[in-house]
Image: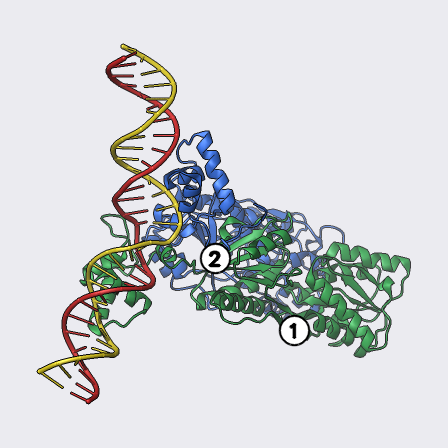
Chain colours: A blue, B green, C red, D yellow
DNA sequence: TATTCTTCTGAAAGCGCTTTCGCAAACGCT
DNA sequence: AGCGTTTGCGAAAGCGCTTTCAGAAGAATA
């Protein structure tokens, strides 16, 4: 007992199994299993012997055997779209933290740049995971329906369930946040003609943010000018083109809600190129508070989304579903507006 | 046969096993296994019957059973430090692509913000994965040594093996890239006093980049002024402070190699605050080409690291190691210098 | 002391696959 | 026709666990 390391038996090259532990401790494998899992009372003396034996042999239960016997994978699947910028790390951290805490592993699968996966990766299928977290844009609706039909526990991230499917989802308060952002422009900075850079059509986020934008107008008795609602696509190039066109066409506006921070990059670039001052001539607010937001010129006022918490909460819901505890059909996490220079706050 | 979905047997609620398939096809389970895996010749007629049966029953092999029988997990472990910015998505995409291509799943574990994990997550231990990809800063050296002692196949990302351990690693051409970046400042822009914002002490990346910085000087017969080598820590706040101090102390310099893009954010901010013009007075180059690099003012000249390829190559090496094929002890992936405004290229 | 509960422990039957081994049948060769 | 070879398939033995079931002690009751 001088090695501090988990080492394979130097002779056989093989690691210990439950039988080895049982033999060394002079008990049956059932007993070993019981002390490992705490599934039934074991007397103090025996427990001590078994634990000593496990130590000596550097015993590590083999997941595959356990999974086979329990018919559970003790694993959460995470299906995500890789495009998601730096949005990604926090999400993963949130999911992983909760998963580990509850004794689940995390199996990852990504949808390539070819858009949503139309077929479920085999690794996430039934029996290989106990449930899967599906992030927006990672899985085609057909595949999602197929998955749901297998009764695999499912939770959606930043998306709502397609018609007829009863799948819990967790996302952020998109509508309220968008409304607050736009209202800030209206109320605090007196803007009256705020451009909306619309997100991709298929994303739920786009939909709700647009709704928030409209609500902000309604609440202040303002009409939404269709000419101000242009494509942004959560993409800086599309956004830049749209803003440049508005400028070229001489459409008057004094604010932009860019839908997300990426689009904000493009918007700022177009404004800058045209010599339009931000925030004096046009106030800009983004969405997401990605790392680059604070580095932009001027620093971007934007909505901070609690991405890590989204991941954590989604994992919690999924685990609840797996363990047949009640779940929240829809979870909306609150956001905060981060005031920086681009809206006109914090001096000029 | 009218459901398009993989569905559990509506009666038992349970999915088909290999025996069900065998029974329906009128063959033995061995034969089913053979057609599933292609491990032995099976006659055309039988193969067709088996395949039909699998279709009918929506048969999906259970990973746990297969893993137990083969004593392999068909899974790659990926241990990473979450802090890594948007560096993260591409890396994952690279790893995952290769893993899937070779029939492996991807199990993820992250080191929280508490620094490197001192203990190996159980899920990545021996028998739960066939091998693990360890990214820089995710696993404490002690844990790494312990892992290595178990003979688990290991590949390091952006780090080199601790003394005495023979672990392949894949990273980028840090030294050459840093040298090229600094030489660009020296040669193309005539800079003679280039600041080095040093990275965190423990990261291999820091070490090699600093070496490249020195080499660039040596090659041009320039001395490195120790006063110009200040902490950057790959962190914008630290970098900002360091640059601000140099400015305050009146240390003359005409260029900065920031070590990474995050530090560049801080450097630019400090320079801007002091009214120093970039690139006229001070030329700046970063490292990484993160998304924010192009969005900075001025857009940042920086080294583009092929992050996705790093992930892919690391996965390839790990799989080679697992399958006992020869591996490359060290893989250095080439980088490119992306010229933008901050160094003086592309107009002003 | 005899009897009924508790507590603890072991034997053994799976979980769903892979894989060796052996046997037939079909093929080629002399 | 006789003899090895292939080729295609099934029986059965695991892989390393969990979990029921029943039995053996020991504690509590009568």
Residue A327 percent location from the top left of the image: 42, 41
- Rate crowding at label 1 as few (under 14), some (14 to 19) or many (20 or more) other CA atoms within 10 Å: many
| Mark 2, residue position | A13
- Contact check, label 2 and label 1, Cβ < 8 Å: no
Residue D30 place in picture, x, y as percent: 27, 10
Observer-nearest of A249 and A9: A9
Residue A21 coordinates in the image, percent (x, y): 44, 44
Instruction: Provide the secondary structure element on which disc 2 rests.
Output: loop
Left or right of B180, for residue B62: left
Tag 1, which chain? Answer: B
What residue is shown with label 1? B335
Q: Quadrant of residue A116?
A: bottom left
Give the spatial CA distance, label 2 vs label 1.
41 Å
Seen at 48% across and 38% down, the residue is A51
Disc on res. A190: none
Q: Is residue B109 above or below residue B54?
A: above
Q: Nearer the viewer, residue B324 or A92?
A: B324
Is residue B231 something that shows in the picture?
yes
Q: Where does residue B170 sit, x and y in percent of width and height?
A: 60, 67
Rendered view: A63 above or below A195:
above
Say whether mark 1 and mark 2 are on the same chain. Answer: no
Which residue is outermost to the right? B250
Instruction: Between label 2 and label 1, give the one nearer the viewer.
Output: 2
Does residue A90 appear in the picture of this structure?
A: no
């Amino acid at each position: 007992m001088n090695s501090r390391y988990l080492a394979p038996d130097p002779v056989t090259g093989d690691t210990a199994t439950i039988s080895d532990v049982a033999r060394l401790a002079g008990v049956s494998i059932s007993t070993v299993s019981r002390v490992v899992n705490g599934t039934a009372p074991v007397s103090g003396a025996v427990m001590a012997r078994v634990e000593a034996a496990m130590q000596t042999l550097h015993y590590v239960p083999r997941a595959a055997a356990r999974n086979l016997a329990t018919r559970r994978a003790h694993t959460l699947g995470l299906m995500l779209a890789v495009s998601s910028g730096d949005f990604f790390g926090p999400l993963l951290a949130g999911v992983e933290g909760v998963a580990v805490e509850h004794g689940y592993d995390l199996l990852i699968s990504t949808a390539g740049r070819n858009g949503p996966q139309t077929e479920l990766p085999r690794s996430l299928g039934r029996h290989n995971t106990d449930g899967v977290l599906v992030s927006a844009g990672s899985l085609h609706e057909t595949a999602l329906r197929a998955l749901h039909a297998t009764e695999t526990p499912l939770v959606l991230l930043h998306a709502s369930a397609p018609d007829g499917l009863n799948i819990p989802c967790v996302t952020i308060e998109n509508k309220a946040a968008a409304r607050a952002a736009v209202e800030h422009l209206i109320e605090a900075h007196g803007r009256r003609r705020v451009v909306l850079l619309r997100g991709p059509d298929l994303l739920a986020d786009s939909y709700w943010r647009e709704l928030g934008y409209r609500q902000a107008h309604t609440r202040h008795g303002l009409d939404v000018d269709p000419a101000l609602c242009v494509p942004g696509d959560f993409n800086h190039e599309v956004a830049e083109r749209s803003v440049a066109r508005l400028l070229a066409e001489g459409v008057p506006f004094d604010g932009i809600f860019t839908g997300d921070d990426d689009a904000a990059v493009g918007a700022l670039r177009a404004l800058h190129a045209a010599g339009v001052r931000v925030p004096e001539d046009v106030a800009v607010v983004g969405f997401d508070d990605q790392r680059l937001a604070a580095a932009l010129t001027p620093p971007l006022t934007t909505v901070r989304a609690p991405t890590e918490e989204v991941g954590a909460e989604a994992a919690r819901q999924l685990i609840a579903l797996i363990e047949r505890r009640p779940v929240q059909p829809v979870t909306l996490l609150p956001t905060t507006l981060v005031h920086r220079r681009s809206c006109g706050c914090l001096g000029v």
